[in-house]
Amino acid sequence: MIDNWGRAIVDLIYLLSAALFVVAIWRLSSPRTARQGNTFAVAGMGLAILATFFHESIDKNYIWMVLAMVVGGAPGYVIAMRVKMTAMPQMVAMFNGLGGLASAFIGVSEALGKSNIATGTFATIVLGAVIGSLTFTGSLVAYAKLQGIKSVTSFKLPVERNLVAFASVGSMIVLIIASILAGSGGLGDTLLVIAFIVALVAGFLLVVPIGGADMPVVIAILNAFSGIAGILTGFALNLQPLIVAGTLVGASGLFLSLLMAKAMNRSLVNVIFGSFGAAAVKGGIESSGEAKPIRETTVEDAGISLGYAKRVIVVPGYGLAVAQAQHAVQELATVLQARGVNVRYAIHPVAGRMPGHMNVLLAEANVPYEDLYEMDAINDDFQRTDVALVIGANDVTNPAARDDPSSPIYGMPILKVDDAERVIVLKRGMSPGFAGVENELFHKPQTNMLFGDAKDSLQKLVGAVREA
């Protein structure tokens, strides 16, 4: 009777944990309630861990269990507390990879040396191990590309990328089928280990040719993969919270992948097997050999334009994150609003290095959520805007995506910044965006460039507006 009551209590705690995960996802859907969402997620994971200590299938070696939590939790806490906002996408990529690797290791360890595993259970273990290991190396490559590690960003495959991709995927499928047919133990275990190793190599080969411009979509896809690996591991271990958490992560990652691909006018297949962003593409000045006009402005002139405008739209990009200028732009907006200027923020779905990057960054500076507008909601308002202030955004404002069929980013929906009466671009120099394409916006007659560090320029603009 006690054992039955114990199982019932563990299952009840698991159910509560799963419910907390669902509530967490719901609360994370808005910056206003995101902190609560994180709290619910932490509480749910804490309950799941607590219940697992008493699960009947777990060896009660509590010393090793606690030691493993400390070894993993301590570095995770330190990294999470110290990571900069600019490096948040890298951290997400790394967490995706580690989650996938954990699922893979658990699956392999559960299978090796056992010859009586049911075919269905062994199939989930094999699939979880392959998907998890692929997610790990793929995420490592994504991390390296976002971090700008040259040995990875400059790596070139010796053969055509689609051939490598198809060969990698094909070999994994063959090994998965062969190991499942062989069953657990003996040959099946050997094929499982080989599939695990091949998947590690495949993860690298699939992601390394993909260009930096596609990394937001790749991260979302890998996020979905890590969730799927968690689901499969949960089925293998019969752990309900892992199944629920994996389902939430997998579904949200897939949904996010589709949204990101739509925002870039791409398909997921095209991201994996296409050539967009695979190499830096020179455009504008270097491709035509003709120097295009650049109009510079001063802080004083830009401050007057902003101070006497009626409507201003701020377009944040990765340059804002690099300069840690979110507080400076919020101060500028406050000063402008005190003068009666209508200030709003236009957020492109793939601005920055990951979905939601700009939203999180601006929320950190207490920018009201009501002032943030998605691309589709604000795009038509640029034509009624006095000044568009572009801060480090490049590819997402490039008119070539709309006007130049020969451009590698042609067809990608962009913010219609060039419809504004005047455009002020804050940028360090004339370097292209992540897609390696020169921004034609910089050469438009209504565009003025204010070169320098974004944070420093914004702080000077605050003073200039006050004096205007």
Image: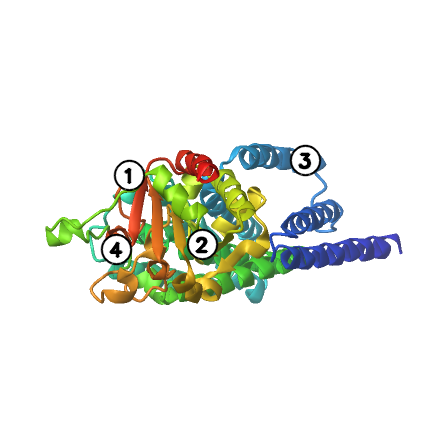
**Going from the N terminus, do you reach mark 1 or mark 3 first?**
3
Q: Nearer the viewer, mark 4 or mark 3?
A: 4
| Amino acid type, label 4 | Lys
Give the mark nearest the N terminus, 4 or 3. 3
Q: Where residue 106 sits in the image (x, y, percent)? A: 56, 49
The residues tagged by marks 4 and 3 sit, at their Cα atoms, a distance apart of: 61 Å
CA–CA distance between discs 4 and 1?
36 Å
Q: Earlier in the sequence, mark 2 or mark 1?
A: 1
Q: Position of residue 145 (x, y in %)?
A: 35, 44
Callout in the foreground (3, 2): 2
Is the residue 195 above or below the residue 255 in the image? above
Q: In front: mark 1 or mark 3?
A: 1
Q: Secondary structure at mark 3?
A: helix
Which residue was labeled with disc 2?
313
User: Of the residues shown, which amino acid type is indicated by label 1?
Assistant: Ser
Residue marked by disc 3: 66
Q: Secondary structure at mark 2?
A: strand
**Are circles 1 and 3 on residues that touch, CB within 8 Å?**
no
Residue that numbered label 1 is attached to: 151
Q: Mark 1 to mark 3: distance in Å?
A: 37 Å
Q: Secondary structure at mark 4?
A: loop
